[in-house]
Image (cartoon, grey):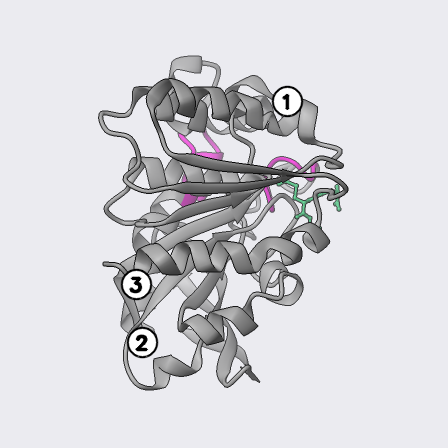
Amino acid sequence: MEILSQHGCFGGRQGFYRHESSAIGLPMRFSVYLPPQAAHGKVPVLIYLAGLTCTEETFMIKAGAQRVAAELGIALVAPDTSPRGANIDGEDKDWDFGVGASFYLDATREPWSRHYRMESYVVDELPQTLAKHFPVDIGRMGIFGHSMGGHGALTLAFKYPQRFKSLSAFAPIVAPSRVPWGEKALAGYLGDDKDAWQAHDACELVRTLAEPYPGEILIDQGLADPFLDVQLRPELFEAACDERGQPLTLRRHAGYDHGYYFISTFIEDHLRHHARQLFAI
Ligand SMILES: N[C@@H](CCC(=O)N[C@@H](CSC=O)C(=O)NCC(=O)O)C(=O)O
């Protein structure tokens, strides 16, 4: 693992790293914030999945999460949003598909299936890499994310609740099989068989899982978000959770859009939500 840069931050350390990923078959970048408590032993860890067009830097630079993470003693980790350098024809043509737009799944359709294996990366390889190189306790690991990353957090936590023991999202894409961003990504990465899409759709998963997710889910959504009615559709997830008996706190905020001013306003609530669950383990 290569250290790209490290910076003192609220008594802890903000770092940026690169490693050879076997799941992806290419080098991957990720960022880690270690709180001051990590100098004395392993700390719980929270994985953040960013949205379309973002990188491993976006959250660490823009969300303002480190101050409260330092107070609580939680490590923050943000992987990049897709493989880079796969050299697939047209991979950076669109901002909502390909580079920066992995949708955090394992593609099954060529040529994407060769490298776009972000589900395996986030669920298995990244936690193992963290456990090997950082003082983090992956037995106390939560997940959250924004927009495409909110979709990733919801679907991965539903599928791997033993891995991700706390869950929240900002303005998530909750029904990718029914909205334009999701339809484009699922068709591109998985093909046209819509049955295969259901395993990557939070609304479908919450209805069909053997057991509800074992924990409260927190979602914040801005009402001035330009993507709200066409791409995000939180009301569909609210109805699915209601139907399933899945505990959900969905907060709607007038005057907030889709950007990091919105995220930075509510980030403290999310960190405290995760801390309550991770420190109870
Ligand atoms: N094409 C635009 C808009 C892209 C955008 O809004 N990206 C969001 C995530 S959208 C869903 O996943 C984002 O987080 N952008 C980064 C930011 O700093 O706000 C563009 O290229 O900007």
Q: Measuring 28% from the left and 61% from the top, which residue is drawn there?
A: 138
As drawn, 82 above or below 43: above
Q: Which mark is residue 135?
A: 2
User: What is the secondary structure assignment of the residue under circle 1?
Assistant: helix
Amino acid carrying label 2: it is Pro
Residue 273 percent location from the top left of the image? 43, 54
Instruction: Say whether residue 50 is left or right of residue 118.
Output: right
Task: State the image quarter where residue 5 is shown.
Answer: bottom right
Q: Is residue 240 above or below residue 171?
A: above
Query: Label 3 vs label 1: CA separation?
Result: 38 Å
Whether label 2 lies within 8 Å of ligand 1 gets the answer no
What residue is at 28 percent from the left and 60 percent from the top? 140
Q: Quadrant of the C terminus?
A: bottom left
Q: Is residue 134 visible?
A: yes
For label 3, being within 8 Å of ligand 1 is answered no
Name the magenta segment's main secondary structure: loop
**Mark 1 nearby-residue class (10 Å; few <14, some 14–19, many ≥20):** some
Tag 3 residue: 279
Q: Dot 3: what SS?
A: loop
Q: Amino acid at mark 1?
A: Pro
Residue at 63% over, 43% down: 52
Specify whether tag 1 is near ligand 1 (CB below 8 Å).
no
Q: For the residues carrying marks 2 and 1, which lies nearer the camera in this image?
A: 2
Mark whose residue sits in front, 3 or 2: 3
CA gap, disc 2 and disc 1: 40 Å
Please provide the residue range marked out in magenta. Answer: 94-118
Residue closest to the eye, 5 or 110? 5
The residue wearing badge 1 is 180
